[in-house]
Amino acid sequence: MHRFAIRLLRSRTAISAILAAAVLAPGGAALALDCPAPQPLTKPGILKESPAQVAAVGKLLTSGDTYNAIAAVTADLRARYPGVERAELVNYLMTAYCPAVAANPRLSEMQKRDAVQSFSSEVMYQVY
């Protein structure tokens, strides 16, 4: 149990640091939102989702009811990928959500970063 707790803490800390770096890029509002790249499908432990599936999830996650969308996507992924790690769920959700927000021309760069930061907090709350 102790090893699991340490591994969980390390993965949560690493994920939080990555998300903060992506959202709070140096230089302020002039920089464009830097989204994480999708993981290669050939690595073990990676969710096997096509780019079209990831884009569809991104569209769902930005459709308005973020809380319920996160819950629905997470439940679906856990059903289709039993034993999926929480860190991988967070990575997948962020990889799907960020490009959808970045492509929204109605939002300023600051609004995009705020949306991603808020989303990442909600994802961490729901997944962990």
Image (tube, rainbow, N blue to C red):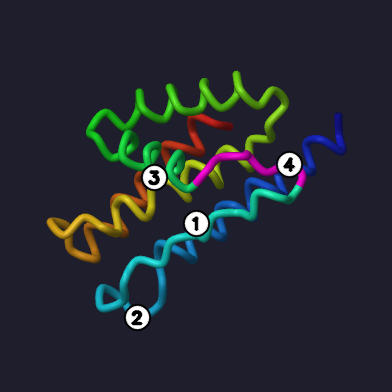
Residue 65, relative to residue 104: is it above or below?
above
Label 4: how many residues lie within 10 Å, few (<14), some (14-19) or many (20+)? few
- Whether tag 2 and tag 3 are in contact, CB under 8 A, the answer is no
Q: Position of residue 49 (x, y in %)?
A: 55, 40
35 left or right of 32 in image: right
Q: Is residue 10 left or right of residue 100?
A: right
Of mark 1 and mark 3, the one earlier in the sequence is 1
Which stretch did the figure color magenta? 44-50
Q: Quadrant of residue 103?
A: bottom left
Q: Say left or right for 75 vs 117.
A: right
Label 4 or label 2, whichever comes before in sequence order: 2
Numbered mark located on residue 19 in the image: 1
Q: Amino acid at mark 3?
A: Ala
Disc 1 to disc 2, C-alpha distance: 16 Å
Residue type pointed to by label 4: Gly
Q: CA distance from mark 4 to mark 1?
A: 20 Å
Cα distance in 3D space between marks 4 and 3: 20 Å
**Front tag of 4 and 2:** 4
- The residue drawn where x is 40% and y is 37% is 57
Q: Look at the numbered disc 2 and give the secondary structure of its residue.
A: loop
Q: Which residue is mark 3?
A: 55
Query: Is label 3 in a helix, a strand or a loop?
Result: helix
Amino acid bearing label 2: Gly
Residue 45 tag number: 4
* Residue 63 image point, x, y percent: 24, 35
Q: CA distance from mark 1 to mark 3?
A: 19 Å
Q: Quadrant of residue 59?
A: top left
